[in-house]
Amino acid sequence: MINAVGREIPDEILRMTGKEPFQGNSYKEGVPFRRYAPIIRPVMDNTHNKMVKDIHEALVKCKAHNGMTVSFHHHFREGDLVVCMVMEEIHKMGLKNITLAATSLGKAHDALVPMIEDGTITSIQASGVRGKIGEAISHGKLKNLAIMRSHGGRVRSLVTGETKVDIAFIGAPTADEYGNLRGVGGKSNCGVLSYSHVDGDCAEYVVAITDTLVPFPNFPAHISMTKVDCVCVVDAIGIPEKIATGAAKPTTDQRKLMMAEYCTQVVVNTPYFKDGFSYQTGVGGASIASTISLTKIMEERGIKMGFGVGGMTKPMCDLLDRGLCRVLLDTQAFDLDAVTNILNPKHHRITAGSYANPFNKGAFVNKLDYVILASLEVDVHFNCNVVVGSDGIITGAQGGHPDTAQGAKCTIVICPLLQGRIPAICSEVTTVTTPGESVDIVVTDYGVAVNPNRPDLLKALEEADCVPLKTIEQLRDEAYAITGVPNPVEFGDRIVGIIEARDGTIMDVVREIKD
Amino acid sequence: MEILKPAVAGTLESSDCMVTVEPGQGKVNLDLDSSVMRQFGPQIKKVIAETLARLDVTDVNIRVVDKGALDCTIKARVEAAVYRSNDIRKDIPWGGAIK
């Protein structure tokens, strides 16, 4: 069946997953459902001991079995040691058919590929997959479908019970012996534990893994002891210098600076730029440069930000420290400044659910005025692809892209016209991850295109005469004139993964690559 | 033009390509490795073949390691490698042989 973004979703996939094709952003608005709740084993005995001597004992106590689903967070980013540590023990125990339900997977997890090949891991659910696991999936090595879902979509999948987690492993920079967990105060700090909050609520067993045991109570707890079954102390849960990989220096790349300037001009010349506006941005060079140049204009005009939300970086923390932003709502620390800035009382931690879950009674993304996003590809329908490389290999993650793009009143995607020889503005993206209906403005180094369904924004930018305005088709034509028209990537028949929309419908499928 | 000795042009930076030429065995023998092979492989081969033909090179082992270079870059790198193999260092007919 052809879905609302024009992608063919084979009936066989719909049958296999029990899912519907994507039918537009508002399809599930107001549709009631009952929240899933896990089985709880009460602890009343005041001598009950949650400490286990190693991961093996935790797995035994939590009834690890063939076919189970285990979950992890990715707050340690490239420096994560927890996923591989736990999976190695599961592998040693000879358990098979494991579903790995991580919030995201990356290069830190390359060592899992042999476990995919030998049938230890047969299903993967994640925001996306970078590194060798992505290549393995694209080459058809994973037995079942990989499911790629946004941060908000993941919370939805747990609270609806679509994904039932048997054991959640929560890497915690500090923990006490009763399972109060914090993202700070230890050796491998990640600032927040936002992504794991839902696992604490929905997993049948919860295991805390820490390298820094602190006296009870570890307070205020980011994840409460009331949700934790076991606490395990290991030598190291993360490599600190790799946790904050986004310690970005301000870029000197003229192309990125130009796009940053266009982006800033777009923000300040659209109607939502007024005192109290809300804003989210990413870690790309252009996004960070744009935040810096936006700061100057905010100071000149005496405009303050109401809130900044999402993954945090130094320029956002600077806004808070200088009194130019009322509060930061943090789901992830991208650099060390963000990790330490969390001590500022106006820098709040929020859960991934309150951030972006489409199936609660309103998430923070719904209150966004502006979100600045990046994309591997944008097509003439304004559809974005942030997961599958132009060569057809899974190489990225949805993150909060579809969540914030839908939520924000003005969604701006920054994308250079060319990524090397690849035209990033193209006729059809390789894989749709964020639907064009969510995307309002595309900023490139060759000009700015406004989605025709936003004539109000186009009018504002035309009147301001601040950036070179082009149609998205013009941009695509300019790109193709420079690079030549690319051959479509040849895929095999087998479908290896699905891109899930926020609401659980199917946005697109990912096929095996043909070698 | 004859390939008199091995010569190299270009780099392995993104958006560039590195071209190595050496005397061949009586024909054009191309070894291409490209980061955009799936999308642009045939186009890159065509540009290299055309450039060699315009330089009248018919006997060469040519290796191109491409990091997503545009056609104009590929042409220039192939041209430079061929001239270097002939020790031609001044009065290079840029755009002369290459239309």
Image (spheres, coloured by chain):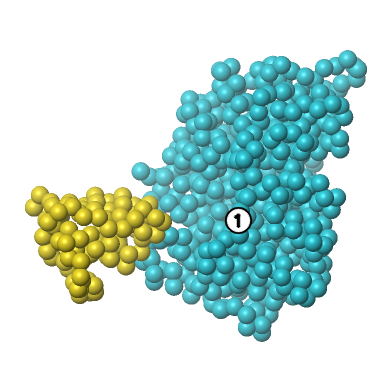
Chain colours: A cyan, B yellow
Q: Residue at x 61, y 59 (%)?
A: A250
The answer to whether residue A80 is left or right of residue B93 is right
Q: Position of residue A220 (x, y in %)?
A: 86, 38
Q: Residue at x 68, y 64 (%)?
A: A291
Residue A104 location, quadrant: top right
Give the residue at mark 1.
Answer: A249
Image position of A384 with respect to A504: above or below:
below
Residue with the most extreme left position = B26
Image position of A479 with respect to A174: above or below:
below
Q: Amino acid at mark 1?
A: Lys
Q: Position of residue A326 (x, y in %)?
A: 83, 60
The answer to whether residue A307 is left or right of residue A480 is right
Image position of A303 with respect to A466: above or below:
above
Image position of A81 with respect to A246: above or below:
above
Is there any visible trace of residue A411 in the rendered image?
A: no
Residue A86 location, quadrant: top right
